[in-house]
C-alpha cells in the first residue's frame, strides 16, 4: 500500500501501445534544446537524474554528455524498454513521490520532462517537487514542464460538439464531447482556472486528470519550495524568460518548461 490515490495513468503507461508511443525517437522540444545548449559544456561534470524517462526520448540527447545518468520511471514496461534500447545507461523503477534510492544532495541536474509531473494531484506534486529539491546538490538545476491553465479554453473548444461533413465524424465528435463533459462536469464554472486537474483526453481518456497551472502560479510553487533563478519557456519557444517577466502570466502555450536552481554553490 502506498497511501496514494489510485493512479489510472500508471496502468496506461504499462500498456504496450503507450510504451510504443513514447519509444518513438522524437527529438527534443524547443526549450529542451535550449537547456541542452546551456548546460552542454557543464554536463560532463554533472550527475543527472531523468525522472519519468518514458521511452528514453531525453536519454538519447542528455545521457551521453552527463558524468553519470540515471533514468527512472514508475512504469516497469517503460524501464524494460529503456534497458533494452540503451544498454550502456542506467535505469530503475522508482516513483517521483519518493526518491528513496537517492541520498540528499546527490544530483546536479534533475529533469522531469514532458509534463509527467502533471499526473500527480496537488499534494503529491508538492511531494515530488520537494524530493527533487532534496536530491539536488546546492546550486543544482531542476527542470520540469507542466500543462498551462491558459491553454484550457483551447482544450474546451477541441471537445465542443460540432456537425461534421460525415455522419461518422459527427458521431465521433458527439461521443468525445459527451466523455469530456461527463468527466469535467464543473469545469465551465471553474474557468478561468488558475490551477487544478482536468481530464484533457490524454491517451484517449485512459489517464487520470492532469494538473494544469497558470505559469505565474507555477513560479510561486517553486518560490515556496525555496528555488531560485526561476525561468520559464513555453513549449513552442526556445527562449527562457525570468519568472517575474510580465509576459509569463498570460503565456498561451499548451505547456511551460520551468527551470530553477537550488540555492547555494553554483
Ligand atoms: C508523458 S510521459 C513522458 C515520457 C518521457 N519523459 C518523454 O518526454 O518522452 C510521462 C512519463 O512519466 C512517468 N511518470 C508519471 N508519473 C510518475 C511518477 N510519479 N514517478 C515516476 N514516473 C512517473 C510515466 O510512466 C511516463 O513514462
Image (cartoon, rainbow, N blue to C red):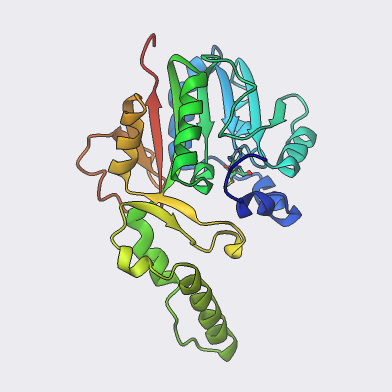
**At 19% from the left edge and 41% from the top edge, which residue is drawn?**
246
Task: Where is residue 5? Give x, y as percent.
Answer: 57, 48
Task: Where is residue 248? Give x, y as percent.
Answer: 26, 43
Residue 263's quadrant in the figure? top left
Q: In this view, which residue lies farthest toward the bottom?
A: 167
Query: Splitting the image into four quadrants, where does ligand 1 fall?
Result: top right
Q: Quadrant of the C terminus?
A: top left
Task: Where is residue 181? Give x, y as percent.
Answer: 46, 73
Observer able to see residue 239: no
Question: Of 173 and 96, which appears nearest the observer?
Answer: 96
Residue 161 vs 261, above or below: the answer is below
Question: Of 173 and 136, which appears nearest the observer?
Answer: 136
The mark total stands at 0
Horizontally, residue 154 falls left or right of residue 206, namely left
Question: Of 120 and 77, which appears nearest the observer?
Answer: 120
**At 56% from the left edge and 86% from the top edge, which residue is drawn?**
171
Observer able to see residue 42: yes
**At 46% from the left edge and 24% from the top edge, which residue is drawn?**
133
Q: In this view, which residue lies farthest toward the left?
A: 246
Q: Quadrant of the N terminus?
A: top right
Residue 126 vs 153, above or below: the answer is above
Q: In this view, which residue lies farthest toward the top?
A: 265
Question: Of 238 and 117, which appears nearest the observer?
Answer: 117
Residue 208's quadrant in the figure? bottom right
Amino acid at each position: 500500500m502506498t497511501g496514494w490515490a489510485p493512479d489510472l495513468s500508471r496502468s496506461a503507461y504499462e500498456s504496450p501501445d503507450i510504451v510504443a508511443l513514447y519509444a518513438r525517437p522524437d527529438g527534443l522540444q524547443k526549450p529542451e534544446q535550449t537547456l541542452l545548449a546551456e548546460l552542454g559544456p557543464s554536463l560532463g561534470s554533472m550527475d543527472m537524474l531523468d525522472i519519468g524517462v518514458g521511452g528514453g526520448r531525453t536519454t538519447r540527447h542528455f545521457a551521453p554528455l552527463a558524468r553519470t545518468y540515471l533514468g527512472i520511471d514508475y512504469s516497469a514496461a517503460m524501464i524494460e524498454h529503456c534497458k533494452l534500447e540503451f544498454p550502456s545507461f542506467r535505469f530503475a523503477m522508482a516513483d517521483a513521490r519518493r526518491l528513496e534510492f537517492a541520498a540528499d544532495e546527490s544530483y546536479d541536474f534533475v529533469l522531469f520532462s514532458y509534463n509527467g509531473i502533471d499526473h500527480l494531484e496537488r499534494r503529491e506534486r508538492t511531494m515530488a517537487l520537494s524530493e527533487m529539491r532534496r536530491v539536488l546538490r546546492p546550486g543544482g538545476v531542476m527542470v520540469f514542464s507542466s500543462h498551462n491553465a491558459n491553454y484550457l479554453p483551447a482544450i474546451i473548444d477541441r471537445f465542443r460538439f460540432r456537425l461534421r461533413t460525415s455522419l461518422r465524424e459527427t458521431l465521433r465528435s458527439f461521443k468525445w464531447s459527451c466523455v469530456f463533459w461527463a468527466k469535467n462536469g464543473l469545469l465551465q464554472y471553474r474557468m478561468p482556472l488558475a490551477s487544478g486537474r482536468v481530464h484533457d483526453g490524454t491517451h484517449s481518456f485512459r489517464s487520470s486528470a492532469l494538473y494544469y497551472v497558470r505559469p505565474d502560479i507555477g513560479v510561486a510553487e517553486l518560490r515556496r519550495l525555496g528555488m531560485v533563478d526561476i525561468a520559464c519557456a513555453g513549449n513552442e519557444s526556445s527562449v527562457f524568460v525570468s519568472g517575474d517577466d510580465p509576459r509569463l502570466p498570460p503565456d498561451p502555450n499548451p505547456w511551460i518548461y520551468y527551470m530553477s536552481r537550488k540555492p547555494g554553490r553554483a
